[in-house]
Amino acid sequence: MPIFVSRRLASSGHGDTQLWLLPGGPGGSANTFKDLEQQLVPVRPDVDFYLLEQRGVGDSAALGCALEESAGSAAGDAITGAEWPASIAALEAQWGDGLAHFSTTEDSEDLASLIRRTWEPGKRVIVCRFSL
C-alpha cells in the first residue's frame, strides 16, 4: 500500500529535531500543512519537517466513492446518511478484506516504522497532530 511522506531537511544543514505533522481527521490531508511548513522553516532552521499522508487519504491509497462524492450527488463531496450504504458497498467491492488495513492501528504502525527508518541518533522526535 502506498504511503506518501513529504520531507524537508533542516535549512541549517544539521537538524537536531524531527517534526512530524499529522492532520487531524478523519480524512485530513497533509497538504494542508504545506503553508504552515513554509512559515516554520525560517523560524526553525534546525528542524527536519515531515508531512505524513495517512492511509486512505490523498496519495496514500485514498478511500473514496466516486458516485457518492461527485458534484452531482446529494451533498457534493460530502456523503449523506442515505448514501452511506452504497459508499460502503463500493469500498468493500474495491478493497475486499484489505479494507481492514485502514485503521488507526495501521496508521500508528506506519508512523512508528517511518520514524525508526528516518531517525538519527541524538535527534529529538516530535509528533504533532492538529487540524487547520
Image: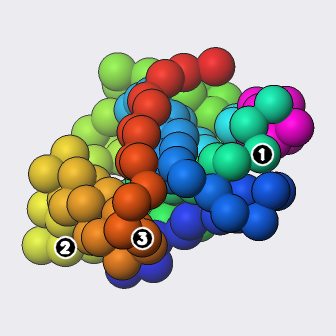
Label 1 to label 2: alpha-carbon separation? 40 Å
Q: Is residue 63 visible?
A: no
Residue linked to disc 2? 98
Q: Which residue is mark 1?
A: 45
Task: Say whether disc 1 or disc 2 marks the residue closer to the N-terminus.
Answer: 1
- Secondary structure beneath disc 2? helix
**In the image, what residue type sits under mark 3?**
Glu
Q: Is residue 36 visible?
A: yes
Badges 1 and 2: C-beta atoms under 8 Å apart?
no
**87 lies above or below 122:** above
Q: Is residue 36 magenta?
A: yes
Residue under the image location 40 percent in, 39 percent down: 127
> What's the residue type where badge 2 is placed?
Gly
**Residue 43 counted in the magenta span:** no
Residue type pointed to by label 1: Pro
User: Of tags 2 and 3, which is closer to the observer?
Assistant: 3
Numbered disc 1: secondary structure: loop
76 shown above or below 92: above
Q: CA distance from mark 1 to mark 3?
A: 17 Å
Between 123 and 35, the one lying in front of the other is: 123
Q: Mark 3 highlights which residue?
A: 120
Quadrant containing the N terminus in the rendered view? bottom left
- Crowding at label 3, few (<14), some or many (≥20) Cα neighbours within 10 Å? some
**x and y percentages locating residue 59 in the rendered image:** 59, 66
Q: Which residues are magenta?
A: 34-42
Q: Quadrant of the C terminus?
A: top right
